[in-house]
């Protein structure tokens, strides 16, 4: 089953126009897939029709999906299936700056409205659900974020993400509480310092590795696949993940500086105070889409390098 890159609607192989949005599907595949055993008719010089049966088999190098780091890439210069992954041409910075404002800014506007009502919790779940779909599309190689539709799937994806974040938070909190209790039970000051030092290193290590869950989840689309075969740890130890972490740290520092400067100027003007809340909502929506788009791009880059399995074009998360 293949999926439209504009609206994520499923379509059967051979469909030319998307049954949902009407987008041309054949152009996305980069060509028309030819099946074996086709026949063609040609007219000969004496006016008679000659039928030729041609049985072609494409020689493709495609190893079975045997694991996380053995992603196989099919090379075929004459045909390209619409379900095959594509890879980004733009730089990471250019992509993540523009991606949240794709489709005329409509997804950004809807995400902002969801974050505006995030105090009700449910809208925040849908906001996370769309952020996942946007990151998944970026990992697949789409140049624009997906359309904001299929609210049922968005809600399910967001609920899974919300539960995952909650679980990771509980684990980190438990580690910190255990560290504090262990330190309180020890009387030797030197031993306390040693426990605190080792504990902090453990917390940092767990935090760093747990951050790799999001890009791996965007790539696999499945919780069970994400936490199988040591994929999270393997990706956490890769250069791709390190690049994403450093890029994200620089982004957050820059965003914090800009936000503080803008907030200070608005407060000093007094009249601009009323703009603080709308700008905070826009910042929340943009940074969320930015973060997921960045991890999607990083995963897509790793897939192009052959270090991870390319994204299959399914749209939703699964257990």
Image (cartoon, rainbow, N blue to C red):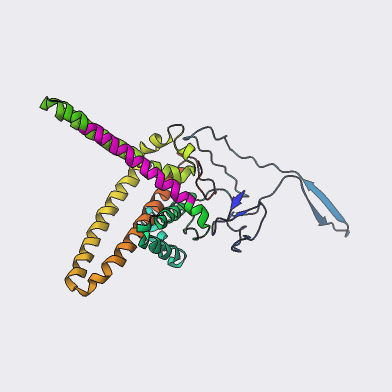
| Lateral position of residue 268 relative to residue 97, left or right | left
The residue positioned 29% from the left and 35% from the top of the image is: 174
Residue 143: image location, x then y, percent: 47, 57
Q: Nearer the viewer, residue 88 or 136?
A: 136
What residue is rendered at 31% in x and 36% in y? Answer: 206
In the image, residue 290 above or below residue 182: below
Residue 36 lies left or right of residue 128; in this view the side is right
The answer to whether residue 316 is left or right of residue 94 is right
Q: Residue furthest bottom?
A: 271
- Image quadrant assignment for residue 95: bottom left
| Magenta stretch holds residue 170 | yes
Q: Main secondary structure of the magenta part?
A: helix
Q: In the depicted view, which residue is nearer to us: 15 or 7? A: 7
Percent from the top left, x then y, of residue 256? Answer: 24, 57
Q: Is residue 275 left or right of residue 167?
A: left
**Residue depicted at 42% across the width and 59% down the height:** 99
Q: Number of numbered discs present?
A: 0
Q: Which residues are magenta?
A: 156-180
Is residue 304 shown to the viewer in this render? no
Q: Of 140 and 228, which appears nearest the observer?
A: 228
Q: Is residue 116 magenta?
A: no
**Residue 250 appears at what percent x and percent y?**
27, 51
Q: Residue furthest left?
A: 189
Residue at 19% x, 66% y is: 264
Using the rendered view, name the quadrant where residue 111 is placed.
Answer: bottom left
């Amino acid at each position: 089953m293949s999926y439209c890159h504009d609206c994520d609607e499923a379509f059967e192989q051979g469909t030319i126009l998307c049954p949902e949005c009407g987008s041309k599907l054949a152009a996305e595949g980069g060509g028309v897939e030819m099946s074996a055993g086709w026949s063609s008719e040609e007219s000969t010089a004496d006016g008679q029709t000659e039928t030729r049966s041609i049985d072609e088999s494409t020689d493709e190098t495609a190893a079975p999906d045997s694991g996380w780091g053995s992603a196989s890439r099919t090379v075929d210069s004459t045909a390209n299936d619409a379900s095959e992954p594509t890879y980004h041409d733009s730089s990471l910075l250019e992509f993540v700056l523009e991606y949240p404002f794709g489709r005329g800014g409509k997804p950004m506007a809807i995400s902002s409205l969801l974050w505006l009502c995030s105090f009700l919790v449910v809208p925040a779940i849908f906001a996370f659900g769309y952020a996942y779909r946007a990151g998944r599309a970026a990992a697949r190689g789409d140049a624009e974020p997906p359309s904001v539709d299929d609210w049922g799937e968005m809600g399910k994806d967001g609920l899974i993400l919300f539960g995952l974040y909650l679980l990771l938070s509980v684990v980190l909190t438990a580690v910190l509480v255990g560290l504090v209790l262990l330190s309180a039970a020890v009387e030797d000051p030197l031993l306390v310092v040693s426990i605190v030092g080792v504990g902090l290193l453990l917390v940092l290590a767990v935090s760093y590795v747990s951050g790799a869950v999001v890009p791996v989840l965007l790539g696999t689309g499945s919780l069970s696949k994400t936490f199988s075969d040591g994929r999270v740890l393997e990706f956490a130890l890769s250069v791709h993940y390190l690049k994403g972490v450093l890029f994200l740290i620089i982004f957050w520092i820059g965003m914090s500086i800009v936000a503080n400067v803008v907030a200070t100027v608005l407060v000093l003007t007094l009249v601009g105070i009323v703009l603080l809340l709308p700008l905070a909502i826009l910042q929340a929506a943009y940074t969320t889409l930015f973060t997921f788009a960045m991890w999607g791009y990083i995963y897509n880059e790793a897939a192009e390098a052959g270090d991870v399995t390319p994204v299959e074009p399914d749209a939703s998360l699964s257990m």
